[in-house]
Image (cartoon, rainbow, N blue to C red):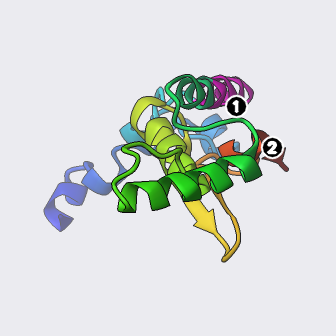
Amino acid sequence: MERCRSYGHDPLAQNQSNDPVLVAQNQNPNPPTNQQNKPQPNVPQEIKDIHSAFDKKVAEMTNNGERINNGLLNNIVSSVQRIGEELHLTKHHLSSCNEQEEAVSNSLNAHMKTSYTFKMKQSWTDSWVVGTSSVKGAPVLVLDPWKNKFEVQQ
């Protein structure tokens, strides 16, 4: 390395500028290549797209007979149907709130190419999906198909 410097070539300084104006302004005309041309996500548009995909997935589950719009009634009917399955009286049950959230989370993670990642969260009485973005300062999304809720939290 010392030999390179003695010939006026410093491999560590290859991205540094010798332009005194840029040096004075603390600018580098040759930024590292991993930062060049990296487009920033359009978070407001992403949120609109995610909301649309959420509504579409909830409608799909409803139309396929996997859920009904009233969350509480959905869980009551689902529980009775599960008892019927255990007794070999029925072969189908509505999706529970956990199953609905899991379906939404999996669908969004698999099909949406956004800065957001979706994970299920739950308490002992409820569950929901939280979307967090890799973009600093982007809002957090709270999705709950059981309650037909899509919330943007700043």
**51 displayed left or right of 61:** right
- Residue underneath mark 2: 152
Q: CA distance from mark 2 to mark 1?
A: 8 Å
Can residue 60 be seen? Answer: yes
Mark found first going from the N terminus, 2 or 1: 1
Q: Residues within 10 Å of mark 2 (few under 14, many from 20)?
A: few
Closer to the camera, 2 or 126? 126
Q: Amino acid at mark 1?
A: Ile
Q: Are marks 2 and 1 in contact (CB under 8 Å)?
A: yes
Closer to the camera, 3 or 115? 115
> Which secondary structure class fits the magenta region best?
helix
**70 displayed left or right of 98:** right
Residue 52: percent from left, percent from top:
66, 22
Residue furthest right in the image: 154
- Circle 2 SS class: strand
| Mark number displayed over residue 81 | none
> Residue at horizontal 63%, vertical 68%?
122
Q: Quadrant of residue 55?
A: top right
Can residue 142 be seen? Answer: no
> Residue at horizontal 80%, vertical 43%?
152
Q: Amino acid at mark 2?
A: Val
> Residue at horizontal 70%, vertical 42%?
25
> Residue at horizontal 27%, vertical 49%?
8
- Circle 1 SS class: helix
Residue 132: percent from left, percent from top:
63, 52
Magenta region includes residue 141: no
Q: Which residues are magenta?
A: 40-55
- Residue underneath mark 1: 47
**139 displayed left or right of 109:** right
Quadrant, the N terminus: bottom left
